[in-house]
Amino acid sequence: MVDPYAVNLEYCRSRQQRLLTHLQEQNLDWAIVTQPEHVQWLSGVRFAWIFQSCAVLTQDGELILVAPQKAPESSAADEIVTYEAKWHSTLRNDQRHAISEVLRSALNRKKSPKRMGVEFSSFGPHLANAFSAQICDIEPTLYYFRRRKDPDELALIKKAIAATGRMYERARQIIAPGVGELEVFNQLQAAAVEELGEMLTATGNDYQCASRGGPPRHDKKAQAGELYILDLGPAFRGYFADNARTIAVTNVTEEQHTAWEHVTRVLQHVQETAKPGKSAKELFGEAQAMLDDAPLGVFNHHLGHGIGMFPHEAPHLNPNWDDTLEVGDVFTAEPGLYAAPLNAGLRIENDYLVTETGVELLSDFPLEL
């Protein structure tokens, strides 16, 4: 059977070309990336979290991948070198050192670089000491490039979002007075695995009843009148979903319904006004003003954020950033209202893709309490 989510060489090569153009503009001979997200972004290969990897893009457009144990069956690398990440089935703790040794050997045939682009937050001394080149931080550029999702990335995100849809279906079937938070967590994880057909690469986020959020508690059972905030973020092959629904354990009170109306109006406003060129900070301010008019509850967190290979990416719908929405962004909007009379409160979150003319709703499943 053909895997529709297999490594797409065309889009990997396109991403390599974007980074290559940056290298040429900045007069950088190589880019060395060690963060697993960036290795995957360039090569298409995602390794298990217990393994370290590395990729080098040279100014002539060659991608060299350093892989643990053996070469992957498919990748967008021009050359693959491997290192022993395990000895006699035991994981090594010095994988970074091993990578530097095999990489140094593989690059000996190439002209020594004068300037290299690296990720300052993760480029360690093992690799730094292997080369004498001046190093420059390309990490902000990589984060910016990652904002524009290619079709292969969008397919993975949509699949992760589909898993949340299955999780909410299961939640609406089982949430009732007396259900335990761990039981809900276990059944929702099972629903996601059923949808994806394989293990999750991450779980998340909030599984508490009558609470703004947090991991499931072993001794908490849902009670009549409470609201159950489920803010779910499963990841499929390294790409995250993140959306929330709030489900009433029993009948909804008038106060809870009024809060729900104010929250869903914000989501409608986002869908009607978000578009390329829109200030994310301005969008946050508009949502804050709308929720400040609610008769009950406070809204005191971000409105949303980008998603992709990390749960929180740009654009940031947050007063501490001043991002502008761009075509290809995938972001969340998660308005909420919280107050004791609401039995903690509620939050509803949708995922959107920024298109040429506005946004496309990616999490199109029921909003009701």
Image (spheres, rainbow, N blue to C red):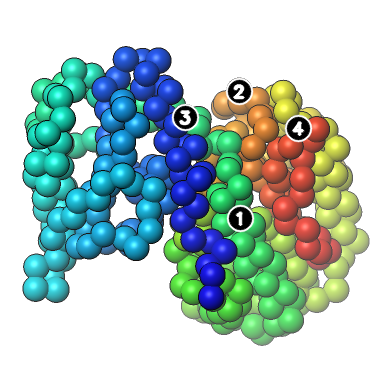
Residue 18, label in figure: 3
Q: Amino acid at mark 2?
A: Asp
Relative placement, left or right, of 56 versus 184 is left
User: On screen, 12 above or below 321?
Assistant: below
User: Residue 265: percent from the left, percent from the top?
Assistant: 86, 45
Q: According to the image, label 4 marks what residue?
A: 356
User: Residue 11: percent from the left, percent from the top?
Assistant: 51, 44
For discs 2 and 1, the disc positioned in front in the rendered view: 1
Q: According to the image, label 2 marks what residue?
A: 322
User: Residue 173: percent from the left, percent from the top?
Assistant: 74, 81
Relative placement, left or right, of 213 versus 337 is left
User: Residue 339: percent from the left, percent from the top?
Assistant: 72, 52
Residue 322 figure quarter: top right
For discs 3 and 1, the disc positioned in front in the rendered view: 3
Q: Nearer the viewer, residue 106 or 335?
A: 106
Sooner in the amino-acid sequence: mark 3 or mark 2: 3
Camera sees residue 362: yes
Residue at the spot x=31%, y=36% of the render?
62
Residue 82 figure quarter: bottom left
Sooner in the amino-acid sequence: mark 4 or mark 1: 1
Q: Amino acid at mark 1?
A: Ala
What secondary structure is marked by label 4? Answer: loop
Measure the alpha-carbon separation of dots 3 and 2.
24 Å
Residue 215, label in figure: none
What secondary structure is marked by label 1? Answer: helix
Residue at the spot x=66%, y=84% of the render?
178
Measure the alpha-carbon separation of dots 2 and 1.
28 Å
User: On screen, 247 above or below 285?
Assistant: below
For discs 3 and 4, the disc positioned in front in the rendered view: 3
Residue 155, label in figure: 1
